Every structure is written in C-alpha cells, then in structure tokens.
Image (tube, helix red, strand yellow):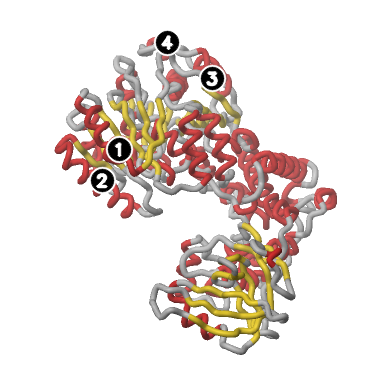
Amino acid sequence: MRPDILNPLFAEVRAMKGVGPGLAKPLERLALVRIKDVLYHFPASWTYRKAVQRLDVADVGCNIILAVTVMDHRSSGSARAPLRIYAADAEGNYITLTFFGRNGGWARKQLPVGEARIISGKLDRYGDELQMVHPDHIVAVGEAGAPGLAEPVYPLSEGLTNRRMGQLASAALEHLPDLPEWIEPSLLTARNWAGWNAALHQVHHKDDAANRDRLAYDELFSNQLAMRLVRAAMDQRKAVPISGTGALVDRLQLPFALTGAQQRVIAEIEGDIAQSRPMLRLLQGDVGAGKTMVALRALLRAVEAGMQGAMLAPTEILARQHFAGLQKLLAGLPVNIAILTGREKGKLREATLMGLADGSIHILVGTHAIFQEAVTYKALALAVIDEQHRFGVSQRLMLSRKGRGVPHLLVMTATPIPRSLALAAYGEMDSSQIDELPPGRTPVETRVISQERLPEIVDGVARHLSAGKQAFWVCPLVEESENSDLAAAEQRAEMLRLRFGEQVAVVHGRMKGAEKDAVMERFIRGETRLLVATTVIEVGVDVPNASLMIVEAADRFGLAQLHQLRGRVGRGAEKSVCLLIRSAQIGETARARLALMRETNDGFRIAEEDLKLRGAGELLGTRQSGDSPFRVATPEQVRALISVAADDARLLLDRDGGLAGPRGEAARLCLYLFERDAGIATLRGG
C-alpha cells in the first residue's frame, strides 16, 4: 500500500485549481494525468531575454524585453494580409509588431493605441524597419505576468501554451510533501546537490544542470535499488540445477554448423544452469546470428534432466513461427512441444494445461499467456524470453514463480535497444553476445530515397516481383493509433493493387489471429508476393524468399525498429535491399538515424547511437526511450550517474542497515514515488 505522505503527488491533475476537462485532454496527450507527472515534466530548453530601454540595431536577432507605447494599427483589409501595429520606445524609436493569421482582433485588444505595454520577443529587421513577429508576451505596465530574463520552454501538445504549462508546474509544486532524504548525505555534499523538494522547485525556475542531475539520480537510484532487491530475492530462492545427459542435444540435427560465438555462449549458459543460483542472462545477438538455436540447446538440456522449458514471444506471429521452427528441428526426438497463446481455447487449451501440469509436455512456446495464473507446470526449470525489450522485470518475476524453485531465465534480443544496454551494463542481468554471423550471410544493402520518387520505387518493385522474388512494404507510423496505421496500410495496399492485383496482401495488428496467420502462410508459400504491413512484422517474421524491404516514411521510425524491419530480409541466399523512404522535409535527428542505417548493419553500434539519440528509457518499466531528467545529458554522463546510483544502492543494502536502517524508510518512499513495482512487490514478499 502506497504511503499516505505520497498521496498528494498521485492525485489526478483535475484536482488542481483551473484544470477542467478541456485542459485535461492536452495534458493526457502528454501523459500528464497525475500531479507528480506534471512535476516531472521538465523544461526542454530555456528562452533567455535581454531587457533594453531603447531599440538598437545591435540587438537584432536577440530576444528582448522592451516597454513601448502603441502608436497605430494598420492592415490592408485583406484577410490574408498581416496586421501591423506600430509602437515606439521611450526615445521615439519605432518598431513594427506583426501578426499573421487570425490574431488581428486579439492583437488590437491587447495593444490599444496610446497605451503603454511591456513586450518581449525576437527583434528582427524587415527592410529598413525593426520588427517583432508575434510577441510572446504583451503585458500592461505594472501588471503581473511580465516576462522574465529566463523562461522555461516545456514540451507541449495542441491546446496547451507554454505559459499555461508553467502555471501548472507552479501549482503542482504547491502539493509537494516534505519527504525525508534518501541519498547518502556525503554524496549530497560532494555533488553540491539540493534536497529533493528544493531541486524540484528549482528545475522549473532555474536552468541548472545540478538540479537535473539530482532528479535524474533519484530515478536511477530507485531503479538500482529495485533491481538489487529483485536479484537478492531471487538469489534467496534456489533454482534446480540442470545437468543434461547429452541424450537429446547429441541427436539434434542442425542445418548448419554452430559458429564459435554460439559455442562460447552455449558454454556460458550451460555453466549457469548447472548452478542452484538462478540464471538471469541477457543474450544479445544481431538478426540472423542464431539465438534461437542457442536457446533450443538450453531447453533440451532441461528436458534431458527431466524438467520443462518455456519460450515466451512478444507476438502471436512470432510465437507460432518459433513453434513451427522448433517442431522441425525436434522431429524424430522424444520431445513433446506445445503452443499456448490467447487463441487456444476449449479442449485444446485444457489438454495443454493438463500436459504442463503432469509433465507430459516438455517445452511450451507461447505469448504472455504462458505465465498467467491458470498455467501451472510440473517442473519448469528454464524460461526463454525472446525480444526481451517487450517485457518488464515485473513480468519476468511472474514467470519466475512458475517453477519448483526459481526457473533459470534466458532473455534474448536481436537489437540491444538502450534499455537493454543499461540492464546489461548496470542491472540485474549477466550478459552474453553472439557477435558473429553464420558464414555465407550477405549484408543487406540499405538505401535512403525521397518520397517524391515513389513512382520510381513502384517501378522497381515491379521488376523485383517479375523476377520471382517477394517484398515487404511497411506503412508509416501516422500517429500512436492502431486505427491510423491500419488506414495507412489499407490505403497503400489499394494503390499497389491497381498495379499488381492479387499479388498484394495486407497484414496488420487488428486482424484476428487465424486471419493474420492465413495471410502470412500464403505469403510464405509464395501465393502472394508483396506484403503490405504495419509494424506487426517488426520481429521474427522469417520469409527467406523476401529480399526487398520498403519502409515508408522511415524518418518516423526509431533506429531499433528500422533495424528490426531490415532484419526481415537478408535471410536467404539472395542479395537483399532495404529501401528507406523519407519524407520531403525531415529534421536533423531523423536525418542522422537514416544516415546511420545506410552506413552500418551492426546492431550493437546502432544500439549505442540509439542511446545517444533517444535516451535510456525505463529500466524496470516498459517505456523504452525518452527520460526527461536526461534530456540534455550525454550517454557518458548517464552511465556515470548510473554507476554512482548502483554504489549508493549497494551501500544502503549492505552497510546502512538495509530498508530497516536510517535511510530505509526514505528509500521505500523513493521506490513508491517512481512506481518500481518489481522492487515494491519484493518488499511485500510478492
């Protein structure tokens, strides 16, 4: 149960004065639903102004604050023409205040002729005149609300102004309780950090990196503390050591020889699972590196020891693909493998549950359904989680309660996204890397091409299909809405059908499982040749004959997604190409992402760049990028801060009396404040 002292921070934003349904909507779009969300919605940048008494051409290009007297209003009468308001400073120097669009009526009211006003904005030159376009502040002399020399600039959404956001932040600060300090006192002194309450006040009113560092540290400290609690709790519960006989592994007929990297990683995993300390290992390997083969060897070791294994996939498509692939590899071996997803119903589901409970099913493949409460295992000893960035620590903990002891956990990722890197380097996981691709793999050639050349791209697809090959066409992320992405996919498919007819198929996340599988099966068999899709195909889909990937509006995708999508091709002997279609106008960050994709196929390098561009995300949650406290920090600064937080968490648990010691109660508040559910569940013995 959350401590009462934190309740004011968890109240809904509507509890603040002046926040009604109209304002709540834009706040919700920014995920600001509770008062603490507003407190941690930090300024993205700051506007600095220069206070001047008189206009001076030397200030052109600067943001200035100036007192003026309004002299005249002029407009051409055309609805499209701007309104120009002429004003003068104390010495009679003129400035033109220009308003475009529908702001004319408002501007006339704010700037009546003959009245004195304080204005602020960027001073520009227009011909021989000095002008200010859309002043950002207009205040009557002597009234409250005059612009300051430094003003925070917040991330906003439609319907929310920067001034209103600043007012909301100030209102939220009034709800701050006086919390005890959880940071080790000597660390506060050494870093010259303010207390938590003071730092939150200052970060909204002062551009100071020290306050950001302190508040970033709080989040990292809660991460480190929660993960240490989780690991300590798991270590207290013993795992069943797995010592396979080799009876199954030696009979496994693989289509190719294992690489040296695979053999090294297999040895690391087999060494872990032979211990009574539960394995928690992150397996990183690029697309096509052979992670599934490594996982299968570990699962067979469990079966050899008379135990059970489970493989968890993030999507039903990937789960069914894993199931089909493992069935082929296990053909002829006395291993009973089953699948369990949300689609398995009735007698089939009951039979699977019975087989797990009595031990007749040796390996289970499925989605998150495999760790639901109704699913019980006779002797689960090893769980493999594919594409681990889709699952948080809390979900892994749920799975860890399914065995006799704690099951050994192997979590895998093809693209070590920023959170995975942070977990591997500083979290509760050990790490292995398959840094070698099987021989004969041809790197995918990546090209970036403008949306304006779409007709040429379609002609290229025609040549590709006429050569008997297949292709993916991934539609853009219109917005965070399945409906919008679906509409984009269907619209593009309709256009492509005008050229290619029934060769075009569509797959998206809103299709029913059976329908989706049927579309994929037809594509895998080559009955359709061009698959138009949303990002439902991002992970795991394996069609060796597909050697062309087209990603439309690729500048809207993150690096990890682009790398995963590119990994859907290049899986056969044929040379493969990935076309990244960019919008006509793109920003510098998007341009850098696309340039990197064109430059390298190395997922590990891409992950490092992703960390620099996107931030580390949540270590114990599911948000995989973006972290307000780190908005202006470099990866090196983040890593250094994580290292300090790790030492402080260790100090608290090992020397300062743990959670029952002097800092313990404050540390508990920190866990609750940042909603570290895994650590809190551990505290409760959950």
Q: How far apart in space, not on screen, are marks 1 and 3 (Cα)?
A: 35 Å
Residue matched to label 2: 492
Q: How far apart in space, not on screen, are marks 1 and 2 (Cα)?
A: 9 Å
- Earlier residue among tags 3 and 2: 3
Q: How far apart in space, not on screen, are marks 4 and 1 (Cα)?
A: 33 Å
Q: Are marks 4 and 1 in contact (CB under 8 Å)?
A: no
Question: Where does the image place residue 255, in percent across and percent down from the top left?
Answer: 35, 13
- Earlier residue among tags 1 and 2: 1
Q: Are marks 1 and 3 in contact (CB under 8 Å)?
A: no
Q: Are marks 3 and 2 in contact (CB under 8 Å)?
A: no
> Which mark is in front, 4 or 1?
1
The residue type indicated by label 1 comes to: Trp
Residue matched to label 1: 473
Question: Where does the image place residue 558, in percent across and percent down from the top left?
Answer: 47, 42
Q: Residues within 10 Å of mark 1 (few under 14, many from 20)?
A: many
The dot on residue 51 is none
| Residue at 47 percent of width and 27 percent of height | 601
The residue type indicated by label 2 comes to: Arg
Residue matched to label 4: 257
- Earlier residue among tags 4 and 1: 4
Looking at the image, which residue sits at the far bottom? Answer: 114
The answer to which image quadrant residue 572 occupies is top left
| Residue at 45 percent of width and 68 percent of height | 25
